[in-house]
Amino acid sequence: MDGKLVTIQTHIVQQQQLHPEASGHFTALLWDLVLAVKMIAREVRRAGLIDILGAIGRENVHGDEVKKLDEYAQERITESLCQNGHLCCMASEERAELIPIPTRYRKGKYVLLFDPLDGSSNIDVNISIGTIFSIHRKITPGDDGRLEDCLQPGTKQAGAGYVIYGSSVMLVYTVGHGVHGFTLDPTVGEFLLSHPDIKIPPKGRIYSINEGNAQAWDPGTAEYVHHLKQRDPATNRPYSLRYVGTLVADVHRTLINGGIFMYPASPKPKLRLLYEANPMAMVVEQAGGRATTGRERILEVQPTELHQKVPLILGSTEDVKAYEEFVQRKR
C-alpha cells in the first residue's frame, strides 16, 4: 500500500476503472450500500444503550422471531438504496416477496439481494452479527424488476460481500477481481483498506459445524468429521472445532485462517441460496477457496424460488475437496 490510506470509495472507483464500459451506476450503488452499513454499525454499537434490543413481537417469512435490529437494518438498506435510480428491485431474507422500487423513483439496471442482519439469535448476547449482500444485473426487459432478475445462478453475480459487526466493523467485498477487506475507523467515519487481496489458505486446521446435529448427519459428513478428530501429525489432525452460529463470523474466520465451514443437507438445509450461500461462495472462490453443496458447486445451482435453502460447505480448497470425497464414497 506504500504507506497510503485507501478509503473504500477510492477503492471502488479503482475497481470501476478495470471496466472501461462502466457507467458509474454500480459504483454509486456500492456507495449507497456503504452508507447504509455505517448507519447499521452505529446502532449495533449502541444497541445496549437505546431501546433497540429484543424482539418486536412477530415472525419473519421463515418463522424466525424478528429482532428490533433486524427491522432497523432492513429499513436502512431499503430506504438508502431505492432512491437513487440504480436498482430495479430488491429481495431480502426478511421479506416474503420481491421488494419493488416505489414508482416515484427512477429504476436502474441492478438487483440487490441481501440478508440485513445475519445471526439475529446472537444479538441479545453481544456476539458478532453481520450483513450479507449480492448484486446481479437486470436481465428482463422494461424498467421494473421481475422475479427472473433475482433467480439467477451465483455465477452471474456482479458483486457480493458481507459486513461483520464484531470487535471492529469490517466490510469484505468482491466484484470479480479478488477479495478486499475494509475496517471502519470510527474516529473519521471511513472504511479503510486493511486486508488487500485476501487469499484463503489452501488448507486449514479448524472445522466449523453445529455438533448438536451430529445424530442427524448424513454418513459422509459424519465420517469426515470423525476423520478430522483423529490424531495424525502428518496431516495436522486433529482439527480444532470453532462454531459461532453467525454465518458471517464463521465464514470470516474461515476466510482469514483457513479450514472448512459446513452446514450439510442433514438434518435439513437451513441457509438461503440467494442471500447467504451465493454471496459467501463468490467471496470464498474469489479468495482461492471452494464452495459446494457436497454434490455440486454452489455458484452453479439454478435458483427456483426466492427463499430456496441449500447445504453449504466452503473454505480451503484441500479441505472442501476432502469433504466431497467422503460424501462421494458414502453415496
Image (cartoon, helix red, strand yellow):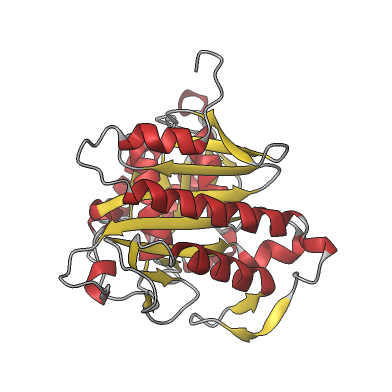
284 or 290, which is in the foreground?
284
Q: Residue at x 50, y 75 (%)?
A: 94
Q: Residue at x 42, y 28 (%)?
A: 197
Residue 297 at least partly seen: no
Q: Residue at x 38, y 74 (%)?
A: 101
Q: Residue furthest right?
A: 49
Please state the total of marks drawn on the protein image: 0
Query: Image quadrant of residue 321?
Result: top left
Q: Position of residue 234 (x, y in %)?
A: 47, 23
Q: Residue furthest left?
A: 141
228 or 279, which is in the foreground?
279
Residue 86 at least partly seen: yes
The answer to whether 92 appears left or right of 147 in the picture is: right
Q: Position of residue 248 (x, y in %)?
A: 54, 52
Asked if residue 180 is positioned above or below residue 161 in the image, the reply reads above
Give the quadrant of the C terminus. Answer: bottom left
Query: Image quadrant of residue 105?
Result: bottom left
Asked if residue 178 is positioned above or below residue 150 in the image, the reply reads above
Q: Position of residue 189 (x, y in %)?
A: 66, 42
Q: Residue at x 39, y 44 (%)?
A: 283
Q: Position of residue 271 (x, y in %)?
A: 44, 65
137 or 266, which is in the foreground?
137
Q: Residue furthest top?
A: 2
Asked if residue 175 is positioned above or below residue 272 in the image, the reply reads above
